[in-house]
Image (cartoon, helix red, strand yellow):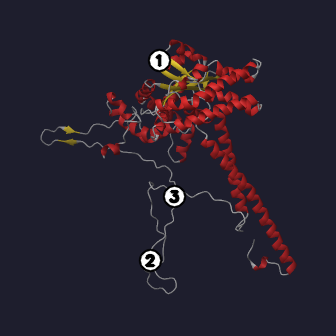
């Protein structure tokens, strides 16, 4: 609406028409915003509900959350656009709730910028006296700064004996490399932590005025993987030393001669926190050119204990040898019923999902308790439900054809019942293998960006870097800061003290100095 006098009508009828038109437009905007706000609040409530139930997260629930979050984002953008298109007109009947404004992070440095003030009073020209000040904070990001560090080693000659003295040359993070530890950590974390291929990083660096060839970046990544290999091995050894492992795998496209083949990235997660364990959590990754069981046998060599995994036939020989005990994943089994409940609305599947969900509800109450405490609760609350579920499944299975999908879902459980019920005998066992599924979720996201690994060697290198980055995250450590500090210290660090650089033992140099 224009506020100029020329835009206002001179006669009463035209003025009435203008008022009615503006009122109709305002009501239309108000109606549109009310509809959008109601839908936004509904989606927020649905997302909150799903996130609250995210314990034992399954693939279908994760996909649902991502889908809803995308829809919510789109609706909020639309609501903002509607509000902007309405101009400055006030709509007081149903104001849209604004996102909560969080205080800006206290740890960030503050740059004080004083706005120019008059030196004399603009009214009378008199002398001004400061009464106080108002501060408006704005969050800003300054593009990365590049530096060339010049390490100077001065030479001195003794006037008495003419001996020449000079400090020793500093260690480089990688042999014959001209990249500093922070730059190397950024490149490695960018590729494997943020899923940014090297050609994209090279383009970004060039836009910032520093041209680095992709081949040079590739050389750096290869050299870093060799330098950090002892840490990767130490993390894998720590995983195998645990009483329980989560194991899973995911396909990765690998470039081969004239075609693309499918390799596998496996993860081996040790996380004792759900049963009150104090040992640090780790996620070790391994690459194999195919899904043959011999590869699983290779990276699990020397391990004895409980293994939570899906019903992969390649694990069969490991279970037969007796050192590894199978614990089945209820979330994986639930998924088979969930698909039937969603797609076919099968009554048996719907009931099965409800019964299994009740088991997960109990598990949420005992997360973090000791194995003995978990077993006590399971004996009282869970065992009767599981026994009733077994009886119910057998009764329903008797009336189904063996070729039906529901029968196959029931058979999946009944044929592996000892593995499914191991958690009732051992308090260290979880109800699901979701720890491993979470560990490989980032790889699935990364596949969309890097498309394929360049070779089997590239797959093994990716597994090593994922091991370092994801283990740092599990221990609440910033992977980029940790990698930078470790790369700077590793050349002069004693090999026998490599454990001091592992994420759960790591102390930054500033902390050591303090």
Instruction: For marks 3 and 2, give the CA distance.
Output: 26 Å
Which circle, 1 or 2, is nearer the viewer? 1
Instruction: For marks 1 and 2, give the CA distance.
Output: 74 Å
Horizontally, is 141 left or right of 450 in the view?
left
Residue in the foreground of this view, choosing between 431 and 502: 431
The answer to whether any part of residue 290 appears in the image is no
> Mark 3 or mark 1, which has the lower sequence index?
3
Q: Secondary structure at mark 1?
A: loop
Disc 3 residue crowd, few under 14, some 14–19, many 20+, Cα 10 Å: few
> Mark 1 or mark 2, which has the lower sequence index?
2
Instruction: For marks 3 and 1, give the CA distance.
Output: 51 Å
The answer to whether any part of residue 133 appears in the image is yes
Residue 124 image point, x, y percent:
50, 87
> Mark 3 or mark 2, which has the lower sequence index?
3
Horizontally, is 140 left or right of 451 in the view?
left
Disc 1 residue crowd, few under 14, some 14–19, many 20+, Cα 10 Å: few
> Hey, which quadrant is residue 288 in on the image?
top right
Residue in the foreground of this view, choosing between 185 and 287: 287
Residue 27 image point, x, y percent:
78, 65
Residue under pointer 1: 301
Give the answer, above or below, for where 361 lies relative to 149.
above
Residue under pointer 3: 103
Which circle, 3 or 2, is nearer the viewer? 3
Disc ID at residue 466:
none
Most extreme residue toward the bottom is 124
Residue in the foreground of this view, choosing between 364 and 440: 364
Residue under pointer 2: 131
> Hey, which quadrant is residue 308 in on the image?
top right
């Amino acid at each position: 609406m224009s506020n100029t006098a020329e835009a206002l009508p001179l006669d009463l009828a035209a003025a009435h028409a203008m008022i009615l038109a503006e009122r109709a437009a305002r009501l239309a905007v108000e109606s549109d915003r009310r509809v959008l706000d109601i839908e936004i609040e509904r989606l927020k409530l649905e997302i909150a509900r799903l996130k609250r139930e995210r314990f034992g997260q399954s693939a279908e629930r994760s996909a649902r959350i991502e889908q809803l979050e995308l829809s919510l984002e789109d609706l909020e953008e639309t609501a903002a656009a509607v509000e902007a298109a309405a101009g400055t007109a006030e709509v007081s009947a149903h104001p849209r709730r604004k996102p909560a404004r969080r205080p800006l992070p206290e740890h960030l440095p503050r740059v004080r910028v004083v706005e120019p003030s008059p030196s004399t009073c603009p009214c009378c020209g008199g002398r001004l006296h400061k009464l106080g000040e108002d501060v408006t904070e704005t969050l800003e990001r300054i593009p990365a700064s590049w530096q060339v560090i010049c390490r100077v080693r001065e030479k001195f000659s003794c006037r008495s004996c003419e001996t020449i003295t000079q400090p020793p040359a500093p260690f480089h993070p990688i042999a014959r490399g001209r990249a500093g530890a922070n730059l190397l950590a950024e490149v490695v974390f960018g590729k494997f932590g943020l899923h940014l291929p090297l050609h994209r990083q090279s383009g970004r660096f060039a836009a910032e005025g520093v041209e680095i060839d992709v081949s040079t970046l590739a050389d750096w990544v290869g050299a870093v993987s060799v330098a950090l290999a002892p840490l990767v091995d130490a993390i894998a050894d720590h995983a195998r030393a645990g009483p329980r492992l989560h194991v899973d795998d995911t396909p990765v496209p690998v470039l081969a001669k004239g075609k693309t083949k499918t390799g596998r990235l496996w993860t081996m997660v040790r996380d004792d926190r759900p049963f009150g364990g104090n040992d640090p959590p780790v996620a070790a990754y391994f690459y194999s050119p195919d899904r043959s069981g011999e590869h699983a046998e290779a990276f699990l060599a020397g391990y004895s204990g409980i293994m939570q995994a899906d019903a992969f036939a390649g694990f069969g020989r490991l279970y037969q040898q007796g050192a590894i005990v199978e614990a089945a994943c209820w979330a994986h089994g639930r998924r088979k019923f969930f698909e039937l409940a969603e797609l076919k609305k099968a009554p048996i599947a719907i009931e099965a999902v409800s019964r299994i969900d009740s088991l997960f509800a109990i598990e949420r109450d005992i997360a973090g308790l000791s194995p003995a405490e978990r077993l006590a609760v399971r004996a009282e609350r869970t065992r009767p439900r599981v026994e009733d579920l077994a009886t119910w499944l057998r009764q329903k299975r008797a009336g189904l054809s063996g070729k039906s999908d529901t029968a196959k879902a029931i058979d999946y459980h009944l044929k592996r019942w000892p593995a499914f019920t191991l958690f009732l005998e051992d308090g260290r066992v979880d109800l699901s293998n979701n720890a491993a599924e979470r560990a490989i979720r980032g790889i699935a996201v990364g596949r969309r960006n890097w498309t394929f690994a360049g070779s089997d060697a590239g797959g093994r290198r990716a597994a090593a870097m994922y091991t370092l980055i994801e283990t740092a995250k599990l221990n609440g450590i910033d992977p980029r800061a940790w990698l930078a500090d470790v790369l700077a210290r590793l050349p002069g660090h004693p090999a026998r003290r490599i454990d001091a650089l592992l994420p759960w033992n790591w102390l930054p140099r500033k902390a050591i100095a303090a």
